[in-house]
Amino acid sequence: MRTAVVIGTGLIGTSAALALSGRGVTVHLVDHDPSRARTAAALGAGTDEPAEGPVDLAIVAVPPAHVADTLAEAMRAGVARGYLDVASVKGGPKRELEALGLDLTAYIGTHPMAGKERSGPLAAGADLFEGRPWVLTPTRDTDTEVLNLALELVALCHAVPVVMDADAHDRAVALVSHTPQLVSSMVAARLERADETAIRLCGQGIRDVTRIAASDPRMWVDILSANPGPVADVLAGVAADLEETVTALRALQSSDEDKRRGGATGVEDVLRRGNAGRARVPGKHGTAPTQYETVAVLISDQPGELARIFADAGRAGVNIEDVRIEHATGQQAGLVQLMVEPSAAGSLGAALRERGWSLRTA
Ligand SMILES: NC(=O)c1ccc[n+]([C@@H]2O[C@H](COP(=O)([O-])OP(=O)(O)OC[C@H]3O[C@@H](n4cnc5c(N)ncnc54)[C@H](O)[C@@H]3O)[C@@H](O)[C@H]2O)c1
Ligand SMILES: O=C(O)C(=O)C[C@]1(C(=O)O)C=C[C@@H](O)C=C1
């Protein structure tokens, strides 16, 4: 990739632009608030001068509600060879784009799992995505060239590509991002009218739990509006735990010893389940909890092959954790190495063979 345009030069757009500029890509910066594009340019993220012709990749980093319109405008103007967005939700924007009747072969939905509670270009950093998962949601229609451009962006940002279906992504982030945001906000909301004597005692625990409660409410209303069902489902589980914990705590206030013992067991149960969940959170920089196994597949050098293999893996219910592509020089073929959880390698291999793919020893 030699040239890119970033549309929406806030936290995420400017961070991607800084990483790309730092690695030699010419980046054009566009924002509907020109002062933000100027700020990003002043930070070294690129130039706010328009590109003279189509660039290699357009990165749309605007709030989720504006993604489809912004992409449609850029695609109609032909500003790039490939287009992607970075919105925190994937199913809604994809369906909006489909409804607009655009040719989506040049588009791929993506989502870097890295961010901050602060917005705008001044909060950006070139290393924001280092070692973090970056979700790619190719479909059957996605051009191989566009998928490769997205993989190149992820590599240039030193992030880790994770291929997923858009709706599976939305269910996953409901659990690991969207519900935690709401719960953090709800805990922080208890402080709004709290007595100053309590506020003075705030220590590291409340700071850890409420950091993301400082996030931009308008952005989060956009995100949650595009993923309400899956978030409500996870939050209902949290509500059930809350109700049981309140009951357990009330039992602890009882003068009856048996009830108190039951209450302590109830409270301990939620704390222990919390320990178990916390132990599953991967290392800070996205280090994988397990070694992956490689499924190597021969693909012909034809448009759409890579997208087709990802779609087939998605259909087999297998998450691709990482991917490597070897282009056999002088041959009209390439070897794709799909890294998956060891328990999924067998079923992925079988599903791909069934669909006519040729597998090789990794
Ligand atoms: N903040 C996070 O932690 C995070 C993480 C991953 C992905 N995302 C996603 O990245 C996207 C951007 O989020 P952000 O945190 O960088 O927000 P931000 O508020 O920092 O930046 C958004 C920028 O888009 C500009 N903008 C809005 N509408 C526009 C339009 N129609 N055309 C051009 N520019 C427009 C705004 O002026 C602003 O500069 C969102 O879709 C969000 O869901 C955010
Ligand atoms: O670290 C933070 O401040 C974030 O909230 C980042 C976070 C997340 O939940 O991990 C928030 C929303 C994004 O879509 C991706 C990342």
Image (tube, rainbow, N blue to C red):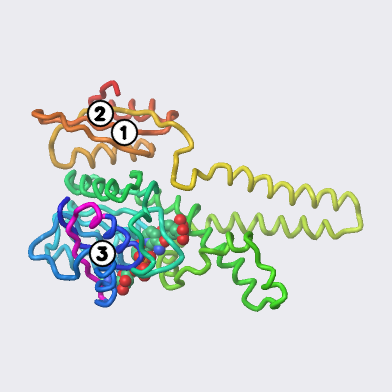
Ligand 2 is found in which quarter of the picture?
bottom left
The span shown in magenta is 20-32
Residue 324 seen from this side? yes
Query: Circle 2 sits in a helix, a strand or a loop, which is it?
Result: strand
In the visual, does 4 lie left or right of 91?
left
Q: Is residue 24 magenta?
A: yes
Residue kind at label 2, given as amino acid type: Val
- The image quadrant that residue 331 belongs to is top left
Q: Residue 297: give its label.
A: 2
Query: Circle 1 sits in a helix, a strand or a loop, which is it?
Result: strand
Question: Looking at the picture, how far across and down is residue 236, in whole percent?
Answer: 58, 58
Residue kind at label 1, given as amino acid type: Leu
Residue with the mark numbered 3: 44
In the foreground, 312 or 245: 245
Q: Is mark 2 within 8 Å of ligand 1?
A: no
Identify the residue shown where x is 31% and y is 53%: 110
Residue with the mark numbered 1: 338
Identify the residue shown where x is 70% and y is 77%: 195
Residue kind at label 3, given as amino acid type: Gly
**Quadrant, the C terminus:** top left
Tags 1 and 2 in contact by the CB under 8 Å rule? Answer: yes
Question: Looking at the picture, how far across and down is residue 227, in whole percent?
Answer: 43, 60
Q: Earlier in the sequence, mark 2 or mark 3?
A: 3
